[in-house]
Image (cartoon, rainbow, N blue to C red):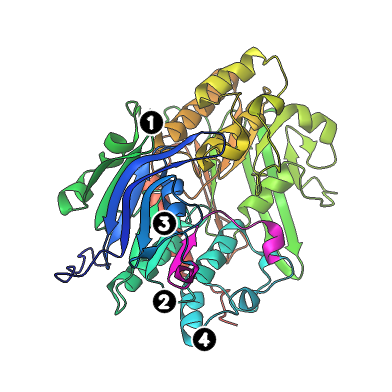
Amino acid sequence: MSTACQAQPVGEPPIVNVDNVSFRYQDSTAGITDVTIQASRGERILLLGKNGSGKSTLLSLIAGKHAASAGKVSVLGRDGFNDTTLNWHVALIGTPWPPEAYFNCSVKRVASPAPDEARRAKIAGALHLPLSADIDKMSAGEKRRVQVLHGMLRENDVLLLDECSTEIDLAERRTVLSLVAEECEGPKRACCIYATHILDGIEDWATRVIVMEDGKVVRDEPYDAALRADKLLAHRWLAKEPFVPFEPVSKYPFAAGDALKEDEVAIRVNNLSFKRGERYILKDCSFVIPKGARALLVGCNGTGKTTLLQMLAGRTFFANKNSELTIHGYRCFHDIPQLNRLVSFGGDWWTRLPGGEMHVGELIASPLTEHAENVRAALRVDLRWDVRYVSAGERKRIQLLLALEAPSQVVLLDEATADLDLDMRHVLLHLLTKYSREHNVTVLYTTHIFEGLENWATDCVILDRNKLGVHEHIRGGVDTRSIMDTLIDLKSKETWFSPE
């Protein structure tokens, strides 16, 4: 992937011009203040900042979703809000679609506006999206890739990516960035602005970086070789607090392949098979997680991670006649009263906001228990927040508070750190580490974000779509770089994909 940005021809105006723009939300919450940036053709701009810093607000203004309170936004020399013909030139790929958006839809139907079928086939193939596939039956990451396909059906002049790679696996994330780079380096020389907190593999992609803080641009400079080589870049720019690395796991009592005593087992998956329609998601899948473990459950999109967590949490019905899934000896789904007292689950993330005013304090039992107050303080959630006017990261922190407000013995988290900035990501991981070490709480955590996870996990279960089960179960020291390499290798060997 080339990092050289083609020079802007002399005299050619910028493709995006944000001139001294400010914006306020209806509740007077600050969005952005006095922001001025320009973007030229061919640029690939990384837009960084903490939760609530104004990244999504800036992208929505450029996309014409809001009118600026002050200042002016122009795209291709035209008014970004009033000129609706810009919808044919600007694509904003951001918030996940609600379920009704793809109900009873195939990929081909969603991508039917394609002006160029060859282009549609090329992008769908690169993203491993069969055109006949039913979107309802896809994983969260596959659904996100459908959004990317939809946003790239036309050759746009401006691509605005707002955390669009959340839920997308590492290998497919690289594919998305490669497709965008082709658009920026191709004949049309599109401009891309990409807001993200996921920095795995981003170093060789960007040509420029803009950093926002408290609604203002605080840094804007070329993303040169020196910056790409600086491994502490993100922590210097994005984290207000010093990064405290996790200590290596030492003297872990369980080795791979060890048989555990029944009172040592937190989670047991025993020859589990599960089908959705006619397709197996998991088949004869088995592994055991010890009590007190901090376990990663990883795999490429479509390997069944979310399905498995939903089954463990009792959110998905299945017979479980032979105790294929148990937590502390209780059968998942069937023994709900006992498991509700044992298990905390974070995974049913909101896909839409309430229609009216709703404050965090109305969603949680009052007064807060000591445990709930400790979680609230760690996640820095303000009970006065109106959930309609918070950032995606702040919204995720609210939901994590609701998931973790009561003490539990097992915590199940599905992509819990997606949308969280670096500070909050590490706060959550350190909080889970404390529970694990001090209270023997078991954590099972699925993620595609590996930055900052070094030395955190005691266990890692890698799922393989070809096997429909476990590729490897690692105990003790978990090398995240090795895990990432394994996932990319497994992706390259997947045999299920057919373009149609």
Q: Which residue is disc 2 drawn over?
A: 155
Cα separation between marks 3 and 4: 28 Å
Residue neighbourhood size for the residue with mark 2, other residues' Cα within 10 Å, grouped as few (<14), some (14–19), many (≥20): many
Callout 2–callout 1 Cβ contact below 8 Å: no
**Residue in front for this viewpoint, 449 or 75:** 75
Cα separation between marks 2 and 3: 18 Å
**Residue in front for this viewpoint, 417 or 280:** 417
Looking at the image, residue 270 sits to the left or right of residue 115; the answer is right
Q: Which residue is disc 1 drawn over?
A: 248
Q: Amino acid at mark 4?
A: Glu
Looking at the image, residue 230 sits to the left or right of residue 181; the answer is left
Query: What SS does tag 4 mark?
Result: helix
Q: Amino acid at mark 3?
A: Ile
Comparing labels 2 and 3, the label whose residue is closer to the camera:
3
User: Residue 92: within the magenta?
Assistant: yes
Mark number for residue 117? Answer: 4
Instruction: Please tell me which of labels 1 and 4 falls first in the chain.
Output: 4
Residue ID at (49%, 76%): 153
